[in-house]
Amino acid sequence: MAVLRVKFTKTKRDKLAQVLWILNWISVVTGAILFSLGLFLKVEINKRGELMAERDIQYMPNMLIAVGLIACAINFLGGKICYDCVDTTKFLRWKLIMLPYIICTFFFTFCVLVGALMCYSMRGELEVSLDLGLTEAMRFYKDTDTPGRCFLKRTVDMLQIEFHCCGNSGYKDWFQIQWISNRYLDMSQKEVVDRLRSNVEGKYLMDGVPFSCCNINSPRPCIQQQITNNSAHFNYEHQTEELNLWIKGCREALLEHYNYIMQSIGLAVLITWLFELSVLTGVRYLQTSLENVLRQGDPNSESDGWLLENSFIETARTNLNIIKSLGKSNQIDTANNGDPNINVPSTSKAHYGPDNVPPKQTPEAEEQHH
Amino acid sequence: MLLKMKFTQQRRVHLAQGLWLLSWLAVMCGVFIFCLGVYLKIELLRRAEVMDNTEIHVVPNILMMVGLASIGTNWVASRVCQDSLDSSRFPRWKVLLMAWFGVAAMLCCLLIAVVVLSYALQGRLEESLKVGLRNGIRFYKDTDVPGRCFQKETIDRLQMEFRCCGNNNFRDWFEVQWVSNRYLDFTSKDVKDRIRSNVDGRYLLDGVPFSCCNPASPRPCLQYHLTDNSVHYNYEFQSEELNLYSRGCRQALIDYYMGLMNSTGPGVLSVILIQMSVLLSLRYLQTAVEGAMALEDPEGDSEGYFLEKGVKETFEDVKANVLTMLKIGQVDPTAAEESPEDADAEKAADNTEKAASPTPAS
């Protein structure tokens, strides 16, 4: 009782082989696309590498790159096999390899599916990484004279200008850190000294933001300093003012950007997975129908193709038994009470001299022979 | 005969095949020129708000026209090549080929004109940008006036994208009131002083908008009181270079557009070369095939040439032809001597001017 049995005439088999050959080549192209998508993601993540804390997010693009390369190789081999399958004599070359190939490809498609699902699950890790990275970057905004951190000011400014965002969660993050370096503070002024004394750590905190937070859609020239002080500016109410600065936080803006990329990549990987699965099904049908043709002996006759020879349960049972017996090859056989000295005669007919008269067989052997 | 070449049948076949490929290459070049024109036009339109006139648009317009015309022309050339080796189909192209040569020569001239124009119009572009940017800076504060409300956003975006400030430099902002009266507190002494300090009653300050700030500066941006060293700690306005963008936007835009046109220069020049080689090869093919068709043995050797007579003679011939064509349209008052040429021309004139008054000569 085979699973999904289909009858194949000779022309149908040939057509299937040709179609599969073309589909395998298309799969090579999709594998190359997956590879380039992985590369693209890697480049995008590295571009903002300064804003991400050390987290394990490189595994995602690396996996995509590996999957893309393996898909190319597997489908290239598949294309070669299908090309040869049109001719039954050439098929004999590949006969022994085909079943392992199909099993390997089946497990590989699992990897592709896992890759697609990982695209959607990377968000959590990315958010934590961005949160930590942005906090650090904002803290070192003022350190333009410290080697190793001197470009952080420029990076953060360009980020806020490009992504239309301000601060980590919002612009108030800037109120909690000192983003003006001590080099540019006049320590002799009373106001500066007051501010420094007003908090425990001696930081110069102010309710102002850098210029890169300014919103270009504002009808009014940008208000950067004394943001929470309504009386410092004419006709200004800071609670209702929405257009002055960028409202969105940079973490959210970057997450949206990466989410968009990841969703598109995830969709592409899912489509590739479906495609690979259908190609695999075709190859399986081709393999079984060609094997049946060889069994029947006449290369031009009809044959059956199927996915599994017996039902799922029986196939599972047989495979389990095979695996069990593989494991048992090192163990002692407990059938005869564990005694290896009992003679278990062979069941083959032996040549016993010119008369060819077999010796009298023991009753045990006769039983076993039947 | 000018620039004669001998053509065997084999050579004619090779020429036809090579020319067919070359003309399809020329079609691709036509597509390239068209796309180039479209790209330039889009780039110019994107910054149309800071340009005063659209004179510079003639460059991309010509490129688009030439691109489309060259696609059609070179496609016709490929059809001619296909028919050239078939003596029954080739004669129908005879009349069209004369016109084709004229069109192809004109396309080459137009492309050369485009290259020349893109350098010559640089001055006009600069003028246009000067006026446009001056207006943009003047209307920066008018975000409540319909028709000008986007000037602020345009100028801010421009300054940030091109890393520039003001028209010539950042001091242009000192001469303009860029803070709207809606946001000025007229009861404050400082505001009243500033407004009284100049004739027009404008609120001028030595400050610039935030979009002039340079992110590469090691220090948080200083926008206001730029000329006053005492207001900011550790600040010297004469030696401070990194605080604001030092380039003017007019210069930045000119550099950008000139760079764009310069980088496309080699491409356009090679397209001109390809078009001229198509023209030359088609002329040789035409004369060689016509010569072969006139022979008793069509597969024999024939001669191909560029011009049948010398340059001067051909020029005189063409001039005479054009003048006779022009004379057909005119009334001829002084036709006392009737040379055979004139008689022919007048007969043609008579036939075409039956409706008009009869000529005194006849």
Image: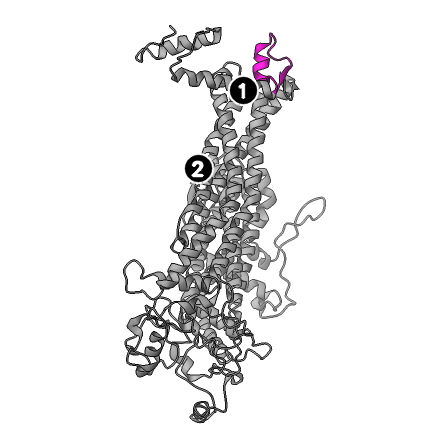
Q: Is residue A251 visible?
A: no
Most foreground residue, A206 or B307: B307
Q: Position of residue B332 (x, y in %)?
A: 40, 13
Give the quarter of the image for residue B346: top left
Q: Which numbered disc covers residue B84?
A: 1
Count residues near mark 2 (Cα–Cα under 10 Å), then give few for <14, some for 14-19, many for 20+.
Answer: some
Element class at badge 2: helix
The span shown in magenta is B286-310
Q: Which numbered disc covers residue A222?
A: none
- A169 in magenta: no
Judge left or right: residue A52 versus residue A238.
right
The chain identifier of the residue carrying mark 2 reads B
Judge left or right: residue A4 versus residue B237.
left
**Residue A238 vertical position relative to residue B130 in the rendered view, above or below:** below
Residue, x 50% and y 87% (percent of image)?
Answer: A186
For the residues carrying marks 2 and 1, which lies nearer the camera in this image? Answer: 2
